[in-house]
């Protein structure tokens, strides 16, 4: 399976790794990337070669969120909505365990992607937040409230406040903070 904005690797022990691959854009989730993730998930879901999926980012960032440049093009609005809805459903309904291996920023749509995964691990330098609320962008509230509780989820979604890895661990957003190669840790 060849993709332009993600990389797929299947490693020993039935582990698939999707790497968001737009490091020059801090792995911003473009329409193309969301469509490629959806396509990849649909294929992996029916594969007997895959038992677990890890999602990570290339470079030093998990994902800084949606590609805001696309939001300046009104002709893309319908496609933004359709690709976002499909991608969210595909991650949510993926039948195998998913692990978000987060380094540095998980903001906006990147934060949403992490919350849609079953397990989240991060590096010490990771930060999480929904800064898009300050510009009228709606955060994905429901899965976040299931993970950290209604009050904290409302706080993060309505204020756009950024939290660090220690706070993310303290509130139960992440299962573990690692200081080694995040993919190596996720595979162990």
Image: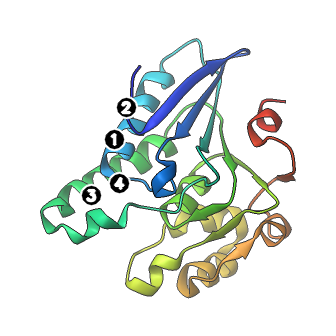
Marker disc for residue 39: 2
Distance of label 1 from label 4 (alpha carbons): 8 Å
Q: Nearer the viewer, residue 73 or 38?
A: 73
Task: Answer whether labels 1 and 2 touch (C-beta < 8 Å).
Answer: yes
Whichever of callouts 4 and 2 sits on the residue coming sooner in the sequence is 2
Q: Is residue 155 shown left or right of residue 110?
A: right
* Residue 153 image offset from top left, x and y in percent: 63, 75
Identify the residue shown where x is 49% and y is 66%.
Answer: 140
User: Which residue was labeled with disc 1?
Assistant: 35
* Label 3: how many Cα within 10 Å (few below 14, some 14–19, many 20+): some
Label 4 with label 3: CB-CB less than 8 Å: yes
| Tag in front: 1 or 4 | 1
Mark 3 → mark 2, Cα distance in angstroms: 16 Å
- Which residue is denoted by mark 4 in the rendering? 84
Q: CA distance from mark 3 to mark 1?
A: 10 Å
N-term-proximal mark, 3 vs 1: 1
Residue that lies at the very extreme toward the left in this rendered image? 75
Q: Which residue is mark 3?
A: 80
Helix, strand or loop at mark 1: helix
């Amino acid at each position: 399976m060849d993709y332009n904005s993600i990389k797929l690797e299947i490693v020993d022990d039935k582990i698939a790794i999707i790497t968001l691959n737009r490091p020059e854009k801090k792995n911003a989730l473009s329409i193309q990337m969301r469509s490629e993730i959806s396509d990849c998930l649909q294929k992996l879901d029916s594969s007997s070669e895959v038992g677990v999926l890890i999602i990570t980012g290339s470079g030093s960032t998990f994902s800084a969120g949606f590609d805001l440049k696309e939001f300046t093009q009104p002709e893309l609005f319908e496609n933004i909505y359709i690709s976002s809805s499909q991608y969210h459903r595909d991650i949510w309904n993926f039948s195998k365990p998913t692990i978000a291996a987060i380094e540095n920023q998980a903001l906006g749509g990147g934060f949403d992607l992490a919350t849609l995964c079953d397990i989240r691990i991060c590096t010490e330098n990771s930060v999480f937040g929904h800064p898009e609320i300050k510009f009228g962008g709606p955060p994905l509230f429901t899965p976040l409230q299931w993970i950290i509780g209604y009050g904290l989820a409302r706080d993060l979604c309505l204020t756009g406040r950024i939290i660090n890895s220690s706070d993310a661990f303290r509130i139960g957003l992440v299962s573990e903070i690692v200081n080694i190669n995040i993919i190596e840790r996720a595979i162990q």
